[in-house]
Image (cartoon, rainbow, N blue to C red):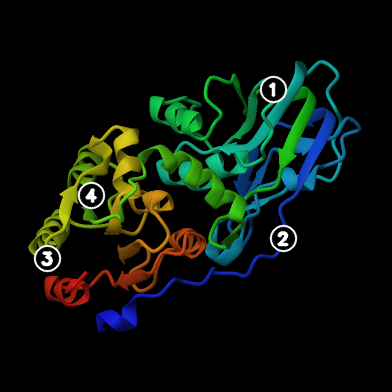
Amino acid sequence: MQPHEAWAVPDFPSPPLDEPTLEVVDGAFLSRLAHGSLRTFGQPSRWIRGAVHDAEGALVVASQKIGGTNGHAWVPADPGSVRVSPDARLLPGRWLYGGHWIQHFGHFVVETLTTLWPDEPDVQGLVFHKYLRRPVVQEPWMLRLLELAGRGGLPIEVVGKAKPLRVERLVVPSRAVVANGWAHPQARQVWERIAAPFRSPTPPTRRVWLSRTEFNRHKRRTGREVRTSPERDRELDAAFAAVGYEVVAPESLHVDDQVRLAAGAAVLAGTSGSALHLSAFAPAGSAVVEVGDQRNPHAPLGLQRVIDHLCEHPHAFLPAAATPDDVGRLLAGT
């Protein structure tokens, strides 16, 4: 693979099949979270419920997370109409619905933050649905990213399995990013707003390898699945260092410094997954190098393609079996 053949802005995995919408729902009812398995072979394999309904119980379709695209496991299974619980807790005033509170770093950046795209300054708080089984937490990095996105200091309500919720007036945007599918310009506007304080007036020059060595070492110690070996992690660190890249452990940095790193990167390189989703904050024209892993050894991750198409990033993919010599050949002259 020659370098000049590798660098190209990727296509969306699927062409956009919807348009952004914005609804204001009076007397909104947010149903409880539920999820389970589908009787299928392959993907999608799981269903999820929990959406916005109007005062009569009719489903607000735009509130649903579109699923099932290109191997995405989850699909929405909300009924078209539900019974509105009269004793559900009521939030008075005008609130903004942010879709799902996804606590995984990459998906929080790509999906949760971007659902807050509407320019609606006069809201009293943010409402989300819980996503899957994790206990709801509000980590400092999440709150800081919300602040940078212009939503800092607002009360946050997350609807889980226990109780539904009613809202006097709820602003409901459609999703700006569809996982493994496509995205709308509103998502890029949110990312640009977050990155703006960290942009330099001069063109970016840093070439950065987002190392997963220490992150994966910690995962192994805690018994979690890791998609590369310790030897492979060290080999990649050495291969990128050998061609002049900074080797950085992003999880060791404050979230401001992670955004600053991406905002000033001429080339951002990493293995497929959450760390490389920091490219959402890189300027148009910055290049992205994705190295495959056991999950997707032969092709780029769908969500990474969504980010890099929307943000106009030339993208190069190295398969999981790429050698240090392959790395050197691809990156010569970058």
Residue where numbered disc 4 is placed: 212
Residue where numbered disc 3 is placed: 243
Residue where numbered disc 2 is placed: 18
Residue 326 is situated, as x and y percent measured from the top left of the image, at 18, 76
Residue where numbered disc 1 is placed: 163
What residue is drawn where x is 32% and y is 83%?
5
- Secondary element under disc 2, as helix, strand or loop, is loop
User: Mark 3 is on which residue type?
Assistant: Val
What residue is drawn where x is 24% and y is 56%?
205
| Disc 2 versus disc 3: nearer the observer | 3
State the separation of the CA atoms marked 4 and 2: 36 Å
Mark closer to the chain start, 2 or 3: 2
State the separation of the CA atoms marked 4 and 3: 18 Å
State the separation of the CA atoms marked 1 and 4: 39 Å
**CB of mark 4 within 8 Å of CB of mark 3?**
no
| Extreme residue toward the right, this view | 56
User: Mark 4 is on which residue type?
Assistant: Arg
State the separation of the CA atoms marked 2 and 1: 31 Å
Q: Quadrant of residue 29?
A: top right
